[in-house]
Amino acid sequence: MDLTFFLAANSGLGFYSLYDGFPEETQFLHIIKGGPGTGKSGFMRRIREAAWARGLDTVSILCSGDPDSLDGLLVPALGQAWVDGTAPHVREPQVFGADADYVNLGRFCHLPLKPEDRERALALNRAYKERYKSAYRLLSAAAALEASEELRDAAVMQEEIERVYGLLEAFPDRKGEARRERRFLSTISCKGLFSLSGTVNSLCKQHYYLRGGSAVLEEAARLAAKKCGRVILCPGPLQPRQLEAVLLPELSLALFSSPAALPVPAGERLQSRAALLRAMEELTAAKSLHDKLEAVYRPYMDFEALDAFTEEYISALVRGAELDA
């Protein structure tokens, strides 16, 4: 089985990252370095395919700007993870060799660039970053327009919390502290608002919608932590400081926030939607520019050497797993 999540969002607060919480401390992280077009996503896809061929489950981390691209991978059975460690989600080991190492794919790119390609790369890099800045301004405006107060009706909130009690009371209390993970289930991207409903359906068969917004979901997560060992907190992509869902895989329960009881006025809702649509157009334009930037580097790549390295890397990974088994 492959579960998919996002670890970042293009939000009203700009680029909002959860990468610091990935993977768990007990899992070793391989940080992939390399410029645009050097094959970071493809490298992880090859590892994922090798894991699937051996019947191993995986967790795929999709790019928040382009869900067709892979920014991270976890193979739980191996206790190992891989992540694109370049901007905007730069990663470095805490203690090199102890918790993480590097995989340098940039070495297969034969530099320097020709003068004309250098100028083109610089121009494209500036242009696509400007598109992202524009998108974040629009997303900030959309978030401000949608920042109506969450429902604070004490009676309704108490009613929803009692509903959560009712859902959880059939499950026995457990000892120990629950593992809390923060993962995005949706993102605002070049493909519009992209949601991972398949992940929810794979983990949780029962879905419930709760009134009261993020505050009720936070309380639900606290109560659920007494019943199960894993609680997945899912922030909303536009306003990531507020939860849109809580997943409880061990209980097969998914709790979602219902639409606000205090709706955004119609005029502000239309303005917010217009800002969101324009932000998505900017993200689409940024993706097109980044594709062109990657194309500048491809003629400099030794893909044959990269393929040979990838095959040997996966072979060594498999041999190591067999020795540990």
Image (cartoon, grey):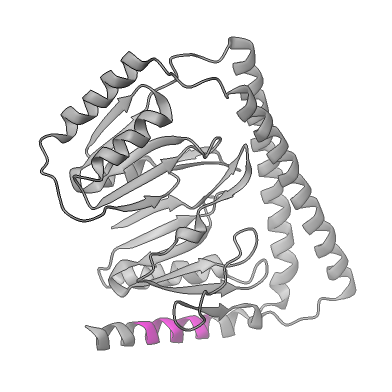
- Is 243 on the left or on the right of 36, as rendered? left
Q: Position of residue 105 (x, y in %)?
A: 60, 78
Residue 171 at what x, y percent from top left?
A: 12, 40
| Residue furthest top in the image | 266
Residue at 44% over, 61% down: 22
Q: Is residue 322 above or below residue 203?
A: below
Closer to the camera, 154 or 95? 154
Report the residue at 67% width, 50% height from top.
287
Question: What secondary structure do most residues of the magenta stretch adopt?
Answer: helix
Q: Residue at x 53, y 73 (%)?
A: 31
Let me know if residue 277 is in the magenta part: no
Which part of the image, by quadrant, shows the C terminus? bottom left
Q: Is residue 316 magenta?
A: yes
Residue at the spot 63% in from the left edge and 40% down from the top edge: 13
**295 over 272 or under it: above or below:** below
Q: Is residue 8 left or right of residue 278?
A: left
* Apparent side of residue 283 relative to residue 56 in the rendered image (left or right): right
Q: Position of residue 67 (x, y in %)?
A: 52, 50
In magenta, the rendered stretch is 307-317
The percent coordinates of residue 324 (x first, y second) are 25, 85
Number of marks in the rendered image: 0
Q: Quadrant of the N terminus?
A: bottom left
